[in-house]
Image (cartoon, grey):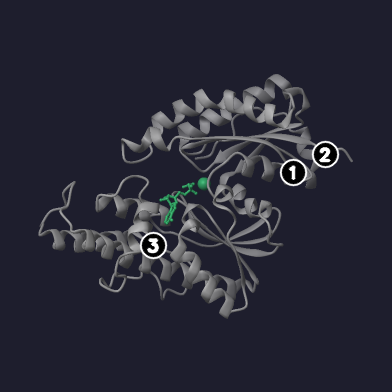
Amino acid sequence: SKPRVVLGFESSCDETGVAICNTHGEILGQALHSQIRMHKDYGGVVPELASRDHIRRLEPLMKEALAQAGLELKDMDAIAVTAGPGLPGALMAGSAFACSLAFGLQLPVIPVHHLEGHLLSPLLADPAPAFPFTALLVSGGHSQLMAVNELGSYELLGETLDDAAGEAFDKTAKMIGLPYPGGPALAKLAEVGDGQRFAFPRPMLHSKNLDFSFSGLKTAVLTTAMKLAGLDQPTETMQLTDTDKADLCASFQNAVVEVLVKKCMSAAAQTGHKRLVVAGGVGANIALRQALQTQASKAGIAVYFPPLSLCTDNGVMIAFAAALRLAKQPELLNNRSYSMTTHP
Ligand code: KG4
Ligand code: ZN
């Protein structure tokens, strides 16, 4: 049968993404704009600026994706949009645009949970994992372990009780004076540091559940850094030697990696899945990849690291998730409700 075509929008944080996918799971067009440069001077994402920029970018990106696909709006069968979680204003920008467009075209709207988008995007990788698999989702905004049984059947196994893993990398990096976004910078410096020098806590390593916590670890790094800099109070700029910085980074990274790997292995043991997928920006971390690979192969588990372009926020993951759902549930085409579906 002729595949249905879905136009999808993502705007939950600092990336505006638009993509077109069909119900055969093919990507027909995609366009993406990252706001990283805009937020850099502020040392983090400024929600108000993010919302305004999404509003500016959505239409031109949509035109770019359509041109790439060689399609027009009249060729679309459904509109998909990230319903949350994310920054409320940013989500509303995408949702208002998508719902208005759908209303004008009299097309159905398919709201997509942002994390479902992340969980399904590894299916676009080569090789793609088959269902079921266990997923570690570690980004700037989320840290979760999920059982992905099949399309539409996801089970939360554990999650962070405070900071997301990427957030912990970013905040720790900022503390010791590395540029935003700090995760990659911290990881790079960690390569030349001594990861054994500081015995930072491994939060919840021995807890029975699959939850994580990273804020205490961040505080431990701060306390140590203050001691090294001879300070009683935290200040904006701490005087640290390059060696101290590198050792702090390496010791911090060791702690995070040890906890994540241990929890992944426990999760896989609990689900019995022989496939483990790592999604989200922190999945780019080489130390995490190596440690997971080593432990997983000992346990006979295959680890999938989808390309980073599929792990970080984008429009494809939203259009793709909606297209897969539409293929399974054609009745979604009957939805003619255009009230915004945003849930932050
Ligand atoms: O998935 P993502 O692009 O955006 C969110 O949805 O949050 O993840 C970005 C996060 C940032 O916190 C960034 O610092 C972190 O991923 N990150 C890394 C590395 N590359 C990106 N963290 C550790 N090591 C890396 N190599
Ligand atoms: Zn995300």
**Picture coordinates of residue 195 (x, y %)?**
32, 70
Q: Earlier in the sequence, mark 3 or mark 2?
A: 2
**Picture coordinates of residue 237 (x, y %)?**
18, 48
The secondary structure type at the circle numbered 3 is loop
The secondary structure type at the circle numbered 1 is loop
The amino acid sitting under disc 2 is Pro
Residue that mark 3 sits on: 213
Q: Earlier in the sequence, mark 3 or mark 1?
A: 1
The residue shown at (60%, 39%) is 315
The amino acid sitting under disc 1 is Glu
Mark-to-mark CA distance, 3 and 2: 44 Å
Mark-to-mark CA distance, 2 and 1: 10 Å
Residue that mark 1 sits on: 26
Question: Could you say which quadrant of the image residue 313 lies in?
Answer: top right
> Is residue 9 depicted above or below 307 in this figure?
above
Residue that mark 2 sits on: 3
